[in-house]
Image: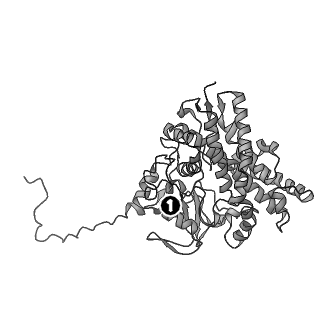
Amino acid sequence: MRTGPPTHSAPDAEPQPEPQSVTQPEPELVPVSLPTGRHSGCPFDPPAEFARLRAERPLRRLHFPDGHIGWLATGHSVCRGIMADPRFSARYELMHYPLADVGELPAAPAGDILGLDAPEHTRYRKLLAGKFTVRRMRQLAERVEQITAECLDDMERRGGPVDLVEVLAQPVPALMICELLGVPYGDRAFFQRHVATMFDQTAGQEDSAAATGALLEYLHKLVLAKRAEPTDDLLSDLTSSDLSDEWLAGIGALLLAAGLDTTANMLGLGTFALLSNPDQLAALRGDPGLAGQAVEELLRYLTVADPGVRSALEDVEIDGQLIRAGETVVVSFQAANRDPAKYPDPDRLDLHRKAAGHLSFGHGAHQCLGQQLARVEMSVAFPALLTRFPTLRLAVPPEDVPLRANSDIYGVQSLPVTWDKE
């Protein structure tokens, strides 16, 4: 008895259709979800999924939580190109949010120049750029050294273990930005609490709006005081411009939030990274002149602020892909900064690396205004800390260091450290 299929058809059998091949889309063209869970195994690494996606295609389709199908850029050259291209808009109301379905985004509020395009952005940025020149920021180095020394004196008096975030990472940038803007340093706990809520991805919209409102209300009152009695600071300087009180308060809030949080987290997370890489820590301790180059590598390696988001104003072809007008592109700085096409062995912290060209301060027209101040603060603080405390070490196991995993600015909640007493 034959149990298999017949070898031929009966004479009167119906003709059978030819089998049709089903064309499957190329895997790299299938929309993916944005990788999250930043610390996958190592607290300093981006999600491991980025490496695979970047290797397949540095620009690919991305599925957004609200259903929009946009793009994810992970390659360094692609990310850099998009950030510098005026055909991509920074306006919030044109974007789709990549982390949650929050509906339509509102336009940038007064003072938030990060959500503007030229020519409006150009005008407001020009008012601020002269206050943050390389020369002017380097002139502040002596004051940064003084503040850092005072923090380290306090740290030594307390004795270990101490929380490095509390005694050094937060006070240094907080004092500097408060002095630069003319904001009372005594109110720093108020600022830091509300700024943390603004950057917290788990905070509800109501809490986030309340924190933003409280900060703007405070700055508005301060602007009125500066108009009445100007002092030697940036906010007082800006009161001589044609900016409204609302705009001045918004700019003040933007600069204060950025100046408080980003550098503080770089100092905390950067110290954690150095303590976790003893050879690199020894290199910096042995050669304080390496500080400037070390800061650039730490910025590349850690990339605490991520991602960037842009929307196409017209059809644009990038890397062989057509991005249509209205589509949103997520630019992953952390993936770009770990691109082996730009940085060999990118997942290794190497303070002798020439890390120029990293995207940790963004790129293009919206590149971070305060980047030179941040560089000065870190170039002073890291070597000063390691010189003063040559036996500095973690006071808890590395896995017990609490991370800011749900914040727009990555870092550590606290960093318990100790050292040998003389």
Residue at 10% from the left image edge and 62% from the top image edge: 7
Q: Would residue 407 be seen by someone viewing this image from the given angle? A: yes
In the rendered image, residue 410, in percent from the top left (x then y), is placed at 60, 47
In the rendered image, residue 251, in percent from the top left (x then y), is placed at 76, 59
In the rendered image, residue 2, in percent from the top left (x then y), is placed at 8, 54
Q: Which of 77 and 343 is in front in this view?
A: 343
Direction from residue 109 to residue 266 in the image, left or right: left
Residue bearing mark 1: 72
Report the colour scheme: one colour
Residue at 55% from the left image edge and 56% from the top image edge: 65
Q: Nearer the viewer, residue 71 or 154?
A: 154
Direction from residue 1 to residue 30 in the image, left or right: right
Residue at 61% from the left image edge and 57% from the top image edge: 361
In terms of secondary structure, where does tag 1 sit? strand
Relative to residue 408, is residue 272 depicted above or below?
A: above
Direction from residue 377 to residue 335 in the image, left or right: left
Relative to residue 236, is residue 402 depicted above or below?
A: above
Quarter assignment of residue 114: bottom right
In the rendered image, residue 372, in percent from the top left (x then y), is placed at 66, 56
